[in-house]
Image (spheres, helix red, strand yellow):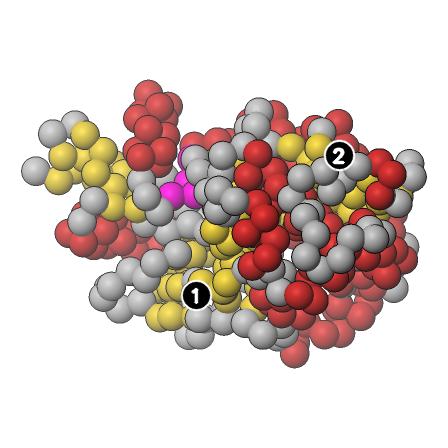
Amino acid sequence: MLKICELTVADETYWDDYINKSPVSTPYHLSGWKRIVEKTFCHKPYYILAKEREEIVGVLPCFSIRHPVSGCSLISLPFTSYGGVLADNPEVEDALISEIKRLTNTLGANYLELRNITPSNGQGLCLKDIYATFVMDIGSDLENMWDRMPAKNRNMVRKALKSNRSEGDSLAEGALAADLLPLATDINRDYLSDFYSLFARRMRELGTPVYSLNLFQNIMEEWETATILVIKRQAMVIAAGLLIPFKDTLYNPWTASNKDFLSLAPNNLFYWECIRYCHENGLAHFDIGRSIWHSGTFNFKKNIGAFPKQLYYQYYLNKAKDMPGIDANNPGYHVYIKIWQRLPLWLTKMLGPGIIRYIP
């Protein structure tokens, strides 16, 4: 008999075992993301699971985001691109979705949002399909990976390396020798503050409230394998990104660079270094993250050789009449974006965390 219940501390190890065995899970489905969001944003989790004969056969992690003005919403999962149901079969999936819809009604939430990698069938869910994620398959032959990249991107990496190598020369081995590099690379958790400085500045440039440094500190504390990859010009970090290895995939949820040095192609070099990192650490996939279809970041990721994969954001509308439209392309936000871009950086870092906690 199928039993639906909420996650308890005693079941967290079994929950994570299920996530680790699932072929479509992400690190954000782990109980660690629950603790990170609780500690950083103080939102209430609703993590429900399905059991048969005391064995977990499905999970649905979710958070209640309660805005003081616009009310409550349920998100699976907030502050990341991924979430939704993981289940052994459609019957378990339907049972979990029915339970979370019941909870949406009980809490009086405006809507439920499931950030699915694969679509959930039925249940009267509305679909938003404006997002794609990019995942690059990493082969065993690094030379072949280099050759598979579009010629334009290879030229930009060469520009970053300032190499005299010709089109046919190898860049897979020894390409980062000191005598070839005006830009240096490094990987170390100690670069967290450098990453955050770039990230906060970049968010201000985009007109987006910034997360607190505390979010990234909590990620580092929860996941010991998380690290920071940086691109440096002499002693200055000009590009940096957070890397999260999980199972056979490297996730890169946040990256930022100094726009004053974009002519040196640090972003192209950053992603090539991520490919090398995957190759050297036996990771089969590189997840570059979400973009709106045909946006600037979408085109950049496509031009470095990654392929888009449709994301299925599905909604159950309770009190809400329409699906939410919290994204930079929503015309209603253009005025606020322009104002935010004009604020001093120190003020955005002070005000941003209190705003972004309600924009999951």
Q: Given the current orientation, which residue lies at the most extreme left position?
A: 1
Instruction: Give the residue drawn at x 44%, y 74%.
Output: 322
The answer to whether the residue labelled 2 contacts the one labelled 1, judged by CB atoms less than 8 Å apart, is: no
Residue 310: assigned label = 1
Numbered disc in front, either 2 or 1: 2
Q: Residues within 10 Å of mark 2 (few under 14, many from 20)?
A: few
Residue 340 part of the magenta-drawn span: no
Drawn side of residue 70 relative to residue 56, left or right: right
Report the front residue among 59 and 319.
Answer: 59
The reply to whether residue 182 is visible in this rendering is: yes
Of residue 283 and residue 197, the one placed in the foreground of this image is 283
- Quarter occupied by the N terminus: top left
Residue 8: image location, x then y, percent: 34, 27
Magenta part of the chain: 25-30
Q: Which residue is mark 2?
A: 186
Give whichever of 358, 203 is nearer the camera.
203
Task: Tell me where residue 193 appears, x and y as whole percent.
Answer: 79, 35
Say which residue appears at 27% left-offset and 38% top-offset: 49
Residue sitting nearer the eye, 38 or 288: 288
Using the numbered discs, state the Cα–Cα distance from disc 2 to disc 1 in whole angstroms.
32 Å
Q: Earlier in the sequence, mark 2 or mark 1?
A: 2
Question: Which residue is at 32% across, 62% downward?
Answer: 119
Which amino acid type is marked by label 1? Gln
Q: Is residue 8 visible?
A: no
> What secondary structure is found at the residue carrying circle 1?
strand
Up/down of 42 relative to 205, above or below: above
Within 10 Å of disc 1 (Cα), the crowding (few <14, some 14-19, many 20+) is some
Corner quadrant of residue 259: bottom right
Picture coordinates of residue 180, whole percent (x, y): 84, 43
Give the residue type at disc 2: Asp
* 306 up-or-down from 180: above or below: below
Say whether residue 277 is left or right of residue 314: right
